[in-house]
Amino acid sequence: MATAKLASDLSSDSKKPESGSSARTAEIYSWAGQLASESRKLDWVLYWYVWPDAVREIIHKLVTMSGGIIGLVGFQGVGKSSALQAIFRSRIEQANRQWQESGEKGTVPRHRYRIVLFKWRRESELFRSLLNGSHEASERFLSVYLPELLKRSSISTPSVASRSNLLYRLSVLEDDTKSITNLSAAGRDPEYYASGAAYEAVNSLERKFDKSTLKKLREAAWLRMLRGNDIILIDTPDYSKTDRRLMAKDLEETYWLWNTLAGSQSIPPNIVLAIQKEMFRDHFFFDKMEKVELEPLKPEHMVEAYRKRFKAIEPFTEDALLTLARMSRGIFRRFLRYITLTLRHWEIGGEGPIDAASVKEAVTAARLAEDMELELVELFPKQSDLRLQAVRLLMLLEESGPRKQSELSEELSLEAYEMSRLLAKLELHHYITRRREGTDKLVSLLKK
């Protein structure tokens, strides 16, 4: 089945978790408490993920690309990590279906997925995380690295009488139910590399090599593991909006990785790199990417995600959920936070379904202002007065829609030059947009 069609199947309502006609409060709390996509089990995309057009576009592109790189661009908090998980999950479902259609029994081997997803780590952190099991690709890495260490050890360790003797010594590891002597069988079993035994074995073997040799062996294993995939999904960290140095360093390392993989095999893997939209400018590497923009979620899409998860909107009314979604300004984790706040408020003294008025009592203007101000701390780190003015301005635009710049100056009691400087800062960081209207400028809120 084609990957693109599979994504369409996954986005349908054909697979949903079992639940009653209305969602229990405890279930909603549990769901809303999973603020980051990393905290959810991967299967969540089968049940309540709302598939944006940008994700479908990337899946289509990956079918025909070879050795390309796609920049998945979106504002901080808009759902880039979730989008990568959805692409990853669609590939797994495709592999599982092809495995079943071919008449094979059992579970499809993980190497058949030929896709890897991980958070970007700098070189100083990369191998530490791969070797202590905290990296998303640790098991895959060990399945390549450990056999190479065993092979090298048997050749370069004169103190060990024979390879079998070395393997025997390594097999005596506490709580290891599989003998490492049967390495070929372990290599076919991903659970072995998820066990503590594999990490113990690597730790024992690495002591036999000097630092320079180990560095080369680790880098070679890392590249070999990546080359074994058709698709590499990389989730970059959130960067400071006012200091681009760390991002520039990471981009240079990613560029080196892309070039190395592209020139090392006949059919190189495709890379999808998730990047903050606030940072997507002024770097040569961006010009080499196919840019796909992930738009902020619309309020109705957030409500759809709730419906897909619970099959009903209770204890909320439709208007209440839409109000919560609008307050969230396109950021899904904020939508989840506001659901939790509203439920707590309702449990204290609410009766009947939760309506829009209850939502506004629970998620106060002060709370909305606080959340906006936290976003703006980085833009105005030592200027609390400007943060306050920016919050007032954004809330005014949220409530009333586009306004003339002169009207905003008058309403917020700011001089024209003060308003101009404030708007220039907010426009630079994609909070608002301005267009000329006669002799004045019309200011609009840029939904995030």
Image: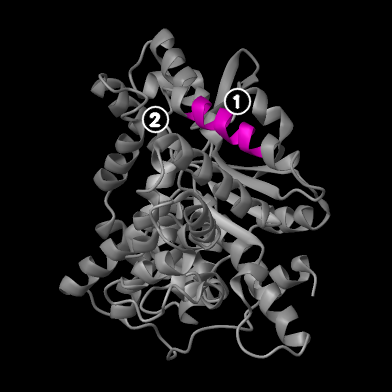
Q: Is residue 370 left or right of residue 35?
A: left
Give 336 or 67, whichever is nearer the viewer.
67
Numbered label attached to residue 281: 1
Residue 117 position in % (x across, y down): 55, 56
Please name which of the two marks, 1 or 2, marks the residue nearer to the observer.
1
Point 42% across, 59% down: residue: 38
Give 365 or 200, whichever is nearer the viewer.
200
Name the residue at the top extreme. Answer: 417
Which region of the structure is painted magenta?
A: 247-258
Per the model, the C-alpha gap separating discs 1 and 2 is: 26 Å
Numbered label attached to residue 247: none
Residue 173 position in % (x across, y down): 30, 71
Task: Say above or below: 63 vs 122.
Answer: below
Assess disc 1: are there few (<14), some (14-19) or many (≥20) residues with their C-alpha within 10 Å of its C-alpha: few
Q: Is residue 347 left or right of residue 446?
A: left
Marks 1 and 2: CB-CB under 8 Å?
no
